[in-house]
Image (spheres, rainbow, N blue to C red):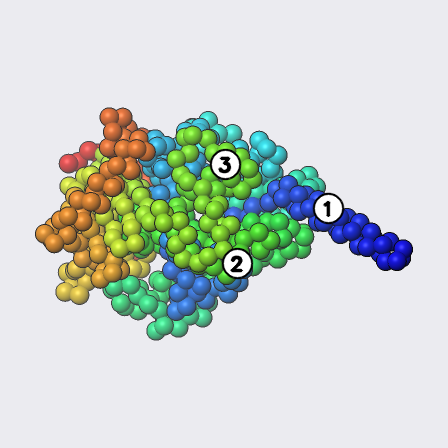
Amino acid sequence: MKSFTSFLLFLIVAFVFFTSCKQASQESASRKMPNFLILMSDNHSWNHLSCYDAESVPTPNIDAVAKEGIRFTNAYCSVPSCSPARAAMLAGQDAWRLQEAANLWGSFPKVKVYTEMMEEIGYHVGIEGKGWGPGNAEAGGWAHNPGGERYDSFEAFFNEAEKGKPWMYWYSSRDPHRPYREGGWEKSGIDLASIKVPPYLPDTEEVRKDIADYFYEIQLFDQDVASYMSLVGEMGQLENTIIVICSDNGWQMPRGLANLYDFGLKIPLIISWPDQFKGGREVSDFVSLNDFAPTFLELVGIAAPEEMNAKSFADILYAEENGRIDDSRNFVVAGRERHAFVRQGGTGYPGRAIRTDGYLYIKNYEPDRWPAGDPPLFGDVDAHMLHYPAPTKIYMLANKNEADVKPLFDLAFAKRPAEELYDLSKDPYQLTNVAALPEYAALKQQLSDQLTKYLRESGDPRETENPFDWDAAEYYQKRDLRPRPNKIAIEALGLEETYDYLNSGE
Ligand SMILES: [Ca+2]
């Protein structure tokens, strides 16, 4: 009997000891701050990864992270243009709240960014590659890139981190930004016949090769992802590191970059933290790059400052379900101001858009301007053709009067009405503007009202009594003001050798 009582006592003590140890270890785990590894591609549309579209470019390494993580099927940027999309991401605000940072090649006013806020609580923060840009950070009062101190490699960054201190590293690749590596399509091993050419581009061999060149650069980014994953693994950091894979905006093709269509705005987004987030999930909630800032801050226990008007989606990361987690995340609002300096006098092409599950509504504030830049360069698609010129664009310009190319040329380069509306269930590629059709009038009004309400609440100068002159803001890439087109473009299109966009030629 005595030995039974002792045994019982032993069991109770052992149980209490075991439970308290477990609690202690859970507490210490929850106190341990996660690391962040952000792996970002450049000018890369959402569907060009095999985990998004099996018939697209094979990206086995990114697919492996997606398998362990959460894949977002409705992720967007705030502006389909490098520096504004990245500024809005860092600041956690709509780009139009950031003055000249809503333009490409502008500066970035000193506002709160998550990178500095993480540094303040002890994070070791660094970037490699592009980070925020292109633009002039110093003019806005920054000592270094707003994305963090720059490093040549993850090893150099990691070696500088104090042991045990959490870190945040942003690898910001320049792939698949143009110019694409010449002959990339051959190295890619992609069968040109297997490529799905979207219906807004001519289906020719030149275009297929151009797409395969772009796919090759995505494959290089996929290899980068593999090397970062193995480096973090070798350093024993994988378990406590949140991996974020995304791009900044869509591909550099007509109706892609610098356009408020899906191929300009919609980005891939995969987030993985096998220790804490249930993986293998596919989530359809609408999220924006702008939401990164409040999300990251919530994940490390910092309250987002009031001026960050984006919303944390940490709840979605911690959820266990697939599909739509938060019913209120059923739309996103985006916009654009000046992309490249491609219109006489340096004007932009201001627009705002609301994207829901079923529709895309766009408001163009200056429909008399050229959406892709003034003819004949149409420089918002492959700025001025200064580098290795984009074969798809050259083909479309050279054949613009052919019956099968003319409608596509007009979609890409011709002037657009003040309102555009696309019915996505019938028209996923956004080719047919139904804004003027009477059967869509009520719906158009509803989307327009919803967009205006959002813009007013977010203090957008375009919709409030708080004007900002984006056309007059400085453009820091001076060579673009008087571009000299590439000789391939000059020969193919009979262009002049130089243009001068500083004249107000209207
Ligand atoms: Ca970009």
**Circle 1: element type:** helix
- How many numbered circles does the render carry? 3
Camera-near label (1 vs 3) is: 1
Q: Residue type at mark 3?
A: Tyr
State whether residue 108 is above or below residue 378: above
First in sequence: mark 3 vs mark 2: 3
Circle 1: is it few (<14), some (14-19), or many (20+) Cα within 10 Å?
A: few
Q: Where is residue 10 in the image (x, y as percent from the top left)?
A: 83, 53
Q: Residue 20 carries which label?
A: 1
**What residue does disc 3 label?**
114
Q: Where is residue 129 in the image (x, y as percent from the top left)?
A: 51, 45
Q: Residue 174 carries which label?
A: none
Q: Which of 132 and 179 is in front in this view?
A: 132
The span from disc 1 to disc 3 (Cα, nearest Å) is 36 Å
Q: Residue, x 15% and y 52% (percent of image)?
A: 440
Q: Residue, x 90% and y 55% (percent of image)?
A: 2
Report if residue 49 is visible in the image: yes
**What residue does disc 2 label?**
279
**CB-based contact (under 8 Å), mark 1 and mark 3:** no
